[in-house]
Image (spheres, grey):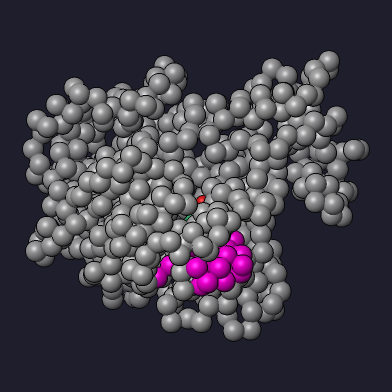
Amino acid sequence: MSQQYTSSYWQERKEDVAWLDEQSLNAAYNAVDKHLETGNGNKTALIYEAEDGTVKRFSFLALSQQSNKFANYLLSKGVKKGDRVFLFLPRIPELFIGFLGILKTGAIAGTMFSAFQKDALRDRLENSGATVVITAKELVDRIEQIKSELPELKHVLIVDDETFQADLELHPDNFSVCKTSPEDFAFMLYTSGTTGKPKGIVHAHYGCLQQHESAKLALDLKPNDIYWCTADPGWVTGIVYSILSNWSLGITTVVYGGRFDAEKWYEILEKHKVTVWYSAPTAIRMLMAKGTPLVKKYNLSSLRYLASVGEPLNPEAVIWGKEAFGKYFHDTWWQTETGSIMITNTPNLEVKPGSMGKPFPWVEAAILDDDGIPVPDEEEGNLCLKPFWPSLMRTVWQNKEKYESYFKNGWYFSGDRAKKDKDGYFWFVGRADDVIKTSGERVGPFEVESALVEHPSVVEAGVIGKPDEIRGEIIKAFVVLKPGVEGTEALKTELAEHVKKHLAGHAYPREVEFIDKLPKTRSGKIMRRILKAKELGQPIGDTSTLEEY
Ligand code: PRX
């Protein structure tokens, strides 16, 4: 194993996860199969509730056997260690089982959020060279539309198709799990930056050790907990804290397959007697908007610990949580790239509403200037972490240059701006780049701009995140139209629909403004910073590199 990830700290805790042998660690075996060997096979691993209220329960034994069938099926289709196998599924049990099955074969699992449309799917499948996509009847059309452009894609499996199901049933429910090394790749997730298409962030099996420890401490998980993480496995939180770490700890986990709905969410908490709840600021603010009296209609006395991730958790939401549930939401900070929670409010840390908390004992975090020099306490700078750690991304798929760009002067630069106070608490300030966080989801402006310019009426577009009380940010597009095209309200709606249809249901501009010309640098780069400053009525700042505007 690469020495750089194995500090003595992690060496000493190595046995907290289950190794296949001295050298082999497989994150799926560790999450599920190991419980069969300790007599916990019959414990409920997954309580799944569909949008229509149907509930299914899966023991660790059932998850193990069903993911074994999946793994056998994949091998029969020629899947080999290191192949990329992607899941494009709604939140149904097969998403969780399929993910585990892929890891068991030694292939690399990729997930794609079910709101993705063909442009977003094509970017991911093309770049990763995925050979198999696992999907469902309701989504398969979107894959069929782009299949001819993906020469490496050999199989499209439809989990609710009768032939597939009959085939799957023929495969045995025992499987010899691939003896992956801790450094072998386990899963990859495409995530957005300022420039270019989304990048494939790749994680290794060894990450499960740190994911296990972080869930235990940051989410305060105990053996008898009923835990609900509301995130979709299309995003990193859903993979790490709804599959790999929670099950590594042997925790009964709730998954709700439906959309956000305040009443429904409270019903889930009440009905399944959830004790630990991990959610996101936009959802908390949406619940807050529905008011405290609604919360009081439900018996939520089982709730013991609340946590949040993904975007800034404003102090009002933390304080409301205390009023409504009698508990604070504990903010946690991390990124797709870090692979596990890095900064957090652990249970015994006094909550300062609005702060992300403090780094874990195994994390060295600092606020540095652009040259990597520490800035004084209370001053804003770059939020940086000292590499390396087990759950850190191992590479950016086929983009070494991008991977290397995260590291400078011996530090990992997160791309976030933050402050540290005199007590050592970290406070989020904003992004150092143009990345947008809308409803907790990370969206690159370039992807939205590219989708907009595909529309026949558009010459070019500049996209920014505009602050929004509920969603954190909304996507706003400034659009230059072709000569003679009239900028009507109907066209604004049409452009938003166009992005929804081509890119993703969640990544469309909620606001569109037509302008004559975009601010650009002399080399032709769109200056989104200027669009944003103008939108917010702020000073435009240094315009020395700006083309005449
Ligand atoms: O800007 C930070 C924000 O989300 C980014 C990472 O997004 P993603 O890779 O999608 O992962 C999200 C879930 C792990 C960060 O660079 N972010 C995440 N957590 C917080 C946050 N911003 C403020 N406060 C947080 N607690």
Question: 508 and 362: which one is in front?
Answer: 508
Residue shown at 18%/22% (left/top)? 163
Q: Which segment did they paint magenta? A: 305-324
Question: 488 and 478: which one is in front?
Answer: 488
Give the x, y percent position of residue 482: 79, 19
**170 horizontally vs 120: left or right:** left
Residue 316 lies within the magenta run: yes
* Residue occupying the far right of the picture: 548
Location of residue 217 (image quadrant): bottom left
**16 horizontally vs 400: left or right:** left
In the picture, the quarter occupied by the N terminus is bottom left
Relative to 213, does residue 265 appear above or below in the rendering?
above
Residue shown at 79%/44% (left/top)? 531
Give the x, y percent position of residue 456: 69, 17
The answer to whether residue 382 shows anywhere in this view is no
**436 horizontally vs 518: left or right:** left
Disc tally is 0
Quadrant of the rendered image holding ligand 1: bottom right
Residue shown at 43%/36% (left/top)? 114
Relative to 147, does residue 529 appear above or below in the rendering?
below
Give the x, y percent position of residue 264: 41, 50
Relative to 90, does residue 344 appear above or below in the rendering?
below
Relative to 215, does residue 163 appear above or below in the rendering?
above
Give the x, y percent position of residue 37: 10, 61
The answer to whether residue 143 shows anywhere in this view is yes
Residue shown at 85%/52% (left/top)? 537
**490 horizontally vs 339: left or right:** right
Residue 397 lies within the magenta run: no
* Residue occupying the far bottom of the picture: 423
